[in-house]
Image (spheres, rainbow, N blue to C red):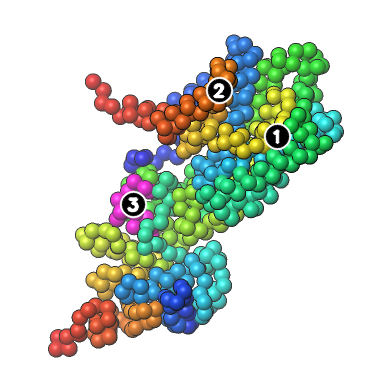
Amino acid sequence: MRIAGPITSATQALLTPGRVIGVALGLLVLLLFPKVLPPFETLQVSYGLIFGIAALGFNLLLGYTGLLSFGHSAFFGTGAYVAAFLVKYWEIRSMEAFIVAGVLGSLAVAAIIGAVCVRYTRIFFGILALALSQVLWSLALKLFWVTGGTDGLRVPTPTLLGGIVSDALGVSADKTEFLAHRYYYYVLVVFVLSTAVMWVIVHSPFGKALQAIRDNEVRAEFVGVQVRRYRYVAFLVSGAFTGLAGTLWVPLNGLTTPDVLYWPFSGRIVFMAVLGGFRTFWGPIVGGFVYNYLEVWAVGTTVYWQLVLGVILVALVLAMPTGLVGTAGQLVTRLRGRPRP
Amino acid sequence: MSLLEIRNISKSFGSNRAVDDVSLTVQKGEFLGLIGSNGAGKTTLVNLISGFFPADRGALVFDGRDITRQSVNERIRVGIARSFQLVNLFDHLTVLDNVALTIFSRQGKTRWLWTLADRDGAVRDEAVTVLGQFGMGPKAGMLAGAISQGERKLLDVAVAYALRPKLLFLDEPTSGVSTREKAPIMDTITAVVRAEGITAVVIEHDMDIVFRYSDRIVAMHQGAILASGTPEEIRRNEQVAMTLLGTHVNHAG
């Protein structure tokens, strides 16, 4: 609950000295990672940044519009496969071309799936999104002469900034070094831009309209918000962000398979947002990082990693229903409210 | 001069005729009270006029134009707004943002993705002014879900008012609040409505409220209009007294 008093706008709230310093420090740490961390750890941060973008896009629907999608693997996978198609069929290796085509591809898929799904809400919306995403998964599986089937498609390291920054097979022969340095900074820049764009969107009049739809769609309609149309635009934006994440992910992974289109991958994105806190802007980003690290840790620790990961995640969500960021916020509020001795 | 003409409008739910061939004219600038027992068809009539659901038969003419087939959004654009019997707010938005969103919507700015909502000083100022008119200024920074029921009732009306309507429907604006709060709430609402020259139709079960604030009262029973007249005429109407008030008119008095 926000208390009465002087009205501080969201932008003013963000631009408090403490928060500016916090964001600047966070960025500084992210900038220094490749210098201080081993390449493997830097790659994990890259994955975290990418999953952060995916979860941020997903959360425009869940946290801000009140729609729980179980079909976001469709957009992530489309972003990945479109980049792979550019390599396979046109021998294009420009990251910028990957991004443009990946985002357009995922937008097209979101336009089709969204046209059907936004007519419904609640469980009907979620299940319909899941069902339609599985059509793409089955196509990726069955059209193996196009998609490579279960073997998937390989994506080599791309050229960055229109070839100004060469790929691993050019100037540098070390692919890991390329991915853990140049590609890391590339991903970081896209991450910062994506986060900034999403922040503006959710604090725009459009973002307020989405929150109104989430809170009370009947009233939203009676103040003139065209609910279905706004849900559709939110679906498109959400799909584009998650598709962008898929496009950034595929050169890092080096390969895309139907697994990224399969419904458990949608579940991972849902979990990232819930784990971090879908009621907060930063929660899904934190969730993306934490989920990735937990998964990497669990995979490296035990062959029963799914079981261990599942137990940990369920325990975390039960212990912190408002997510990591939500719980942290509550703790800070409680500490500030405690009278000083 | 009429603002709204309801012509032979009907609505059934299954075998239940909720509104049965109702014709009514609402004059510009009047404060019309709509009374009737539960199930009389008052809220259904408001739902039909505001576009919540379509009429089975009949026509609606608002400010000279036929709005019978228009969508909710189109009816809002021509100047019809409403509040709700069960308060309908955006609980996770602040009180200020509840009103600001309505203003953004009215101005067609909710389509804007690339501007920050709270940087629009004009909208912000107007929202603060609206809240001030309803005595809600000190609550502006609170979440709508965290204010009292009486304040929520006022905010519900303030949100509708921010659309700058010509015709405002108030569906039980004082239901669920204490007796002590009812008159101040109605005083606030009527002061704003009359100052702005807005035509208002109020549905209310509290007869003291209706008779005190209305220019004219329409009594409904079983989906049809039972009587229409000034508060004094309705008070003296034997049929209304028997059917709705459960009393007899005291002719000796």
Nearest to the eye among marks 3 and 2: give it.
Answer: 2
Secondary element at tag 3: loop
Name the element at disc 1. helix
Q: Amino acid at mark 3?
A: Met
Question: Label 1, on which residue?
Answer: A258
Indicate which disc residue B240 carries: none
Judge whether residue A307 is colored magenta.
Answer: no
Tell me the tag on residue A305. Answer: 2
User: Around disc 3, counting alpha carbons within 10 Å, would you say few (fewer than 14), some (14 to 19), or many (20 or more)?
Assistant: some
> Which quadrant holds the N terminus of chain B?
bottom left
**Chain letter of disc 3?**
B
Confirm or deny contact between disc 3 and disc 2 (CB under 8 A): no
Q: Visible in this render: residue B222?
A: yes
- Is residue B119 in view? no
Residue B156: say if magenta: yes
Question: Residue A232: where, in percent of width, then height?
Answer: 61, 50
Q: Give how far apart the Cα atoms at labels 1 and 3 are.
A: 55 Å
Label pair 1/3, CB-CB below 8 angstroms: no
Residue A274 at x, y = what percent?
49, 35
Query: Which circle marks residue B136 in the picture?
Result: 3
Task: Report the residue that reaches farthest toward the right.
Answer: A90
Q: What is the x, y in percent for residue A24?
A: 53, 23
In the image, the segment drawn in magenta is: B144-157
Q: Main secondary structure of the magenta part?
A: helix
